[in-house]
Amino acid sequence: MTAGLSDFGIKVERPTKTLRELALEKVREAIVSGHFKPGDRLVERDLCAQLGVSRTIVREVLRHLESEGLVANLLNKGPIVALLDPGEARQIYEIRGALEGMAARLCAERGDPSIVSALEEALHGIRRSYGEKDMGGVLTHTSAFYHALFSKVDRQVAWGIVNLLTVRINHLRSMTIKTDNRHVEGPAQMERIIEAIRQGDGEGAYRAAMDHVDSAAAIAEAVIANQTPSA
């Protein structure tokens, strides 16, 4: 019996990510991090040079980001970083509040010490990243905090809904985490969520989660009101 090439172990493995996917991640990150600001023009030629990819890939990336709400295509101006809409932001925070409040209450009622440990680990990462002025790290550990909040009480459907909004949530979060004293207030509010969960106080955990979201929503509203389109 003749051995095939697959038996010999020389199969060519596909790259884990395509060039298009890598370019999409880079541009999305540049928008969410604030490198490209709301109203900035996204010139295809410049993006091709900066990313080192073809115009076809850049156009596909911009179309995808438009579907995510991060890019807008304006008549006679072309693609720009979308201006944040206050009404849409308000709805996102309403959804966040409802789901995160529910998850926090359930975590408190579960009485599982591993929940507190996971949340404390994520919060430690948030504080460390703030100390290192690593805003990308703040976003990563914040996402880990909320993933633990939902996954530890088996609320995958709710987490899936949050994930559908992750890009827009992180776009808003990338602005609020940079505001004055947020590096102190944000973690302190999250600490109150953890403490209520540790105490098994479902109502307290719910209220702490809602207070945290309400605070972020108020900051985002102020930031959006002051956004100015680029010329």
Image (tube, helix red, strand yellow):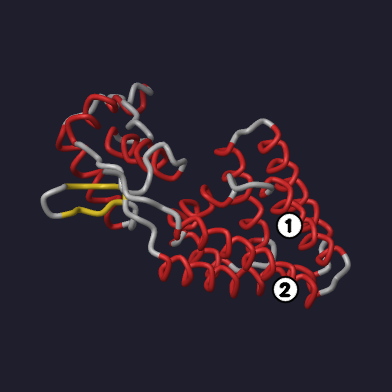
Q: Residue furthest left?
A: 76
The percent coordinates of residue 218 (x first, y second) are 58, 64
**Could you tell whether 37 is left or right of 127 in the image?**
left
Which quarter of the figure has residue 86? bottom left
Classify 111 as above or below 72: below
Q: Which residue is mark 2?
A: 206
Q: Alpha-carbon neighbours of circle 2 within 10 Å: few (<14), some, or many (≥20)?
A: many
**Could you tell whether 118 is left or right of 142 in the image?**
right
Q: Amino acid at mark 2?
A: Tyr
Q: Which one is nearer the viewer's eye here, 99 or 219? A: 219
Q: Which one is nearer the viewer's eye here, 82 or 180? A: 180
- Circle 1 sits in a helix, a strand or a loop, which is it? helix
Q: Amino acid at mark 1?
A: Met
Q: Residue at x 18, y 54 (%)?
A: 74
**Could you tell whether 194 is left or right of 93 in the image?**
right
The percent coordinates of residue 10 (x first, y second) are 34, 21
- Circle 2 sits in a helix, a strand or a loop, which is it? helix
Q: Which one is nearer the viewer's eye here, 10 or 137? A: 137
